[in-house]
Image (cartoon, rainbow, N blue to C red):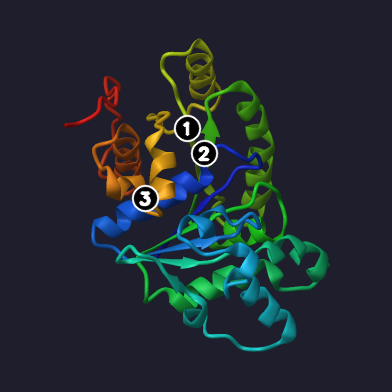
Amino acid sequence: MIAWAVANQKGGVGKTTTTVSLGGLQAKRGGRALLVDLDPHGSLTSYFGYDPEEGVPGVYTLFQRRVQGKTLAPRDIVQSTRIEGLDLLCASTALATLDRQLGNRDGMGLVLAQTLKALESDYDHVIMDCPPMLGVLMVNALAACEHLLIPVQTEFLAIKGLERMLRTVSMVSRSRKGGLKHTIVPTMYDQRTRAANEALSHLRKTYAEQTWKGVIPVDTRFREASQQATPLTLSRPGARGSRAYAHLLDWLEGKMTQWPMEMQYEESP
């Protein structure tokens, strides 16, 4: 089982869209994927029709049972989605209280890693959608993942926020044998604007080794897909956003070693 985390200590940069799009593609290609919502806002949970306000059994349950010293079969709290091969561990708004509840309890940083180990025979891929703040939930995701994806909107305020995330990566890497593999993914790119082009150029010059050579373009169909509770990569595979995520997944899986720089994401018929 391959585990990826999607994180940035800034909101609104495309974390949930990235998680949903890659998960949808993996299911489409015949894999079994588990999406994990670690954000108390529950955007990923809401995407698939579950209400984080209702306290659906999920991530919070894992930590609650651990604190209570009770055993829990992770499979009992995995929820299905309408997409075959795609399951979900839901968030709840109660996740916002975890850091306060747990205090300095030992062993809380590996709860998710241990849970995923119990599920490794059930899934080929796990993608974790992280909250936009450093705390026990992000620490769990970074401890459990093999590769961290950092979506960064192509505008300068988002790039400035990237520095904080990279400091977190550096801190975590020092505590992990072999460090933490990570990739910056430029998102919401609009090639028609000077600001987006300058921001993309800055990313590629300043973080050349860490930045994916492709881009995720602005595509209004992402919003339409969320209203249908279906990943755009499944409902409209020819959309420019879907094609971009397909290239990203190919690159992550080693199927594409060189980015076609001439690619403009023209809409396919």
Reading the image, the residue beneath label 3 is 231
Question: Outermost residue, bottom direction?
Answer: 70
Reading the image, the residue beneath label 1 is 187
Q: Number of labelled discs? A: 3
Sequence-wise first label, 3 or 2: 2
Q: Is residue 222 above or below residue 119?
A: above
Q: Is residue 169 above or below residue 122?
A: above
Q: Secondary structure at mark 3?
A: loop
Q: Secondary structure at mark 1?
A: strand
**Disc 3, disc 1: CB below 8 Å?**
no
Question: What residue is drawn where x is 64% and y is 64%?
Answer: 53
**Amino acid tagged 2:** Pro
Report crowding for label 3: few under 14, some 14 to 19, many 20 or more residues within 10 A (C-alpha).
Answer: many
Q: Nearer the viewer, residue 39 or 46?
A: 46
Numbered disc in front, either 3 or 1: 3
**Disc 1, disc 2: CB below 8 Å?**
yes
Using residue 125 as the reference point, say whether residue 182 is left or right of it. right
Note whether residue 119 is visible: yes
Question: What residue is drawn where x is 57% and y is 23%?
Answer: 155
The N terminus is located in which quarter?
A: bottom left
The C terminus is located in which quarter?
A: top left
Reading the image, the residue beneath label 2 is 151
Sequence-wise first label, 1 or 2: 2
Note whether residue 104 is visible: no
